[in-house]
Image (cartoon, rainbow, N blue to C red):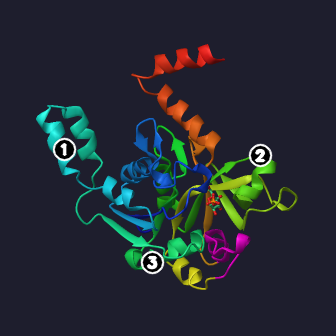
């Protein structure tokens, strides 16, 4: 029986240059989809999956994230005085219990693999989930919850995967697939951002991972890969043969909120699911087209 996943890492150190000027003084993870910041969707997905400890790997200019997951006394007091109970509940519900969240800074932007390595002392010797808030996944059951259910059967390392267009392989970690069993695809190899002509498939890694603690030893080699960065993909690939590695085809629609079009699509999709917004947004879209 594999060890339960209690901890999750949220790498939130990225600069968000694709959303300038919006991200000049605001972390990209605080960009809202309708009325909730991206990072809160990721945290809620982790909570739904049973995660109890949240480890944020941050960087300069990211303190708004810490403030977001803390009490805002003046605001709460004002909402209470004005009897705004629904809004007060929304604010309070987003706050984890004391000690559940830990923050550490990456200090240098050396890549996703390095960011994950920075969380090693908070994780210790147990398996851990990783969630990239840019990848927003709309589904009945949260993507990480689905993954952990599958992981409880097979253990090892696991990455969420989905099919992308061939021309898009150079934006993703790409899988060499082996045997397929329902939602699980055996992964024989992984390569970070291959050119279309060199891609072993069109199965791309999406930002949800379950990793065994051995990954930290490999990450501490600080080997540089694609783009001169320490790539998480490379360390996971080097664990093939030492740990089972599976790709998990999740149920749900994924939005690349690191891109403008994905971010806009997510806003529309999430607005269409909201009772208070569905009709007006439908009417607006019809009018515009
Ligand atoms: C990261 C990973 C990549 C993965 C992608 C998913 O890339 O390095 O393997 O496919 O996330 O969104 P990034 O988008 O940070 O460049």
**Mark 2 or 3 closer to N-term?**
3
Q: Residues within 10 Å of mark 1 (few under 14, many from 20)?
A: some
For marks 2 and 3, give the CA distance: 34 Å
Comparing labels 1 and 2, the label whose residue is closer to the camera: 1
> Left of 91 or right of it: where is 136?
right
**Residue at horizontal 60 percent and vertical 13 percent from the top:** 287
Q: Position of residue 101 (x, y in %)?
A: 32, 64
Q: Inspect the magenta stretch and tell me whether residue 53 lies in it.
A: no
Q: Position of residue 117 (x, y in %)?
A: 51, 76
> Left of 79 or right of it: where is 67?
right
Q: Position of residue 106 (x, y in %)?
A: 48, 74
Q: Is residue 158 visible?
A: yes
**Mark 3 or 1 closer to N-term?**
1
Q: Position of residue 80 (x, y in %)?
A: 14, 38
Residue of label 1:
76
Q: Nearer the viewer, residue 68 or 41?
A: 68
**Label 3 residue near ligand 1, CB within 8 Å:** no
Comparing labels 3 and 1, the label whose residue is closer to the camera: 1
Indicate the quadrant of ligand 1 in the picture: bottom right
For marks 3 and 1, give the CA distance: 35 Å
Q: Which residues are magenta?
A: 223-241
Compared with 39, 105 (above or below) is below
**Label 2 residue near ligand 1, CB within 8 Å:** no
For marks 1 and 2, give the CA distance: 46 Å
**Mark 1 or 2 closer to N-term?**
1
Q: Nearer the viewer, residue 203 or 13?
A: 13
> Left of 52 or right of it: where is 150?
right
Residue of label 3:
120
* Outermost left residue: 81
Secondary structure under tag 2 reads loop
Residue of label 2:
165
């Amino acid at each position: 029986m594999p060890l339960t996943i209690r901890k999750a890492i949220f790498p939130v150190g990225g600069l968000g240059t694709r959303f300038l000027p919006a991200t000049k003084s605001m972390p990209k993870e605080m960009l809202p989809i309708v009325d909730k910041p991206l990072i809160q969707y990721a945290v809620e997905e982790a909570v739904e999956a049973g995660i109890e400890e949240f480890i944020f790997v941050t960087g300069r200019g990211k303190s708004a994230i810490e403030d977001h997951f803390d009490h805002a006394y003046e605001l709460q007091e004002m909402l209470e005085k004005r009897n705004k109970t629904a809004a007060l509940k929304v604010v309070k519900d987003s706050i984890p219990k004391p000690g559940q969240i830990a923050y550490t800074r990456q200090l240098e932007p050396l890549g996703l693999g390095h960011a994950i390595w920075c969380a090693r002392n908070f994780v210790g010797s147990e398996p851990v989930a990783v969630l990239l808030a840019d990848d927003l996944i709309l589904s009945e059951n949260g993507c990480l919850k689905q993954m952990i259910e599958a992981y409880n059967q097979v253990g090892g390392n696991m990455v969420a995967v989905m099919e992308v267009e061939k021309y898009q392989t150079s934006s993703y970690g790409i899988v060499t697939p082996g045997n397929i069993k329902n939602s699980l695809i055996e992964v024989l190899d992984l390569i970070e951002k291959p050119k279309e002509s060199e891609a072993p498939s069109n199965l791309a890694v999406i930002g949800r991972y379950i990793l065994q603690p051995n990954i930290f030893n490999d990450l501490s080699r600080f080997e540089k890969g694609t783009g001169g960065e320490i790539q998480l993909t490379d360390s996971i690939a080097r664990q093939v043969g030492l740990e089972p590695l599976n790709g998990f085809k999740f149920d749900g629609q994924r939005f690349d909120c690191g891109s403008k079009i994905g971010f806009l699509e997510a806003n529309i999709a999430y607005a269409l699911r909201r009772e208070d917004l569905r009709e007006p947004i439908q009417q607006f879209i019809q009018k515009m087209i």
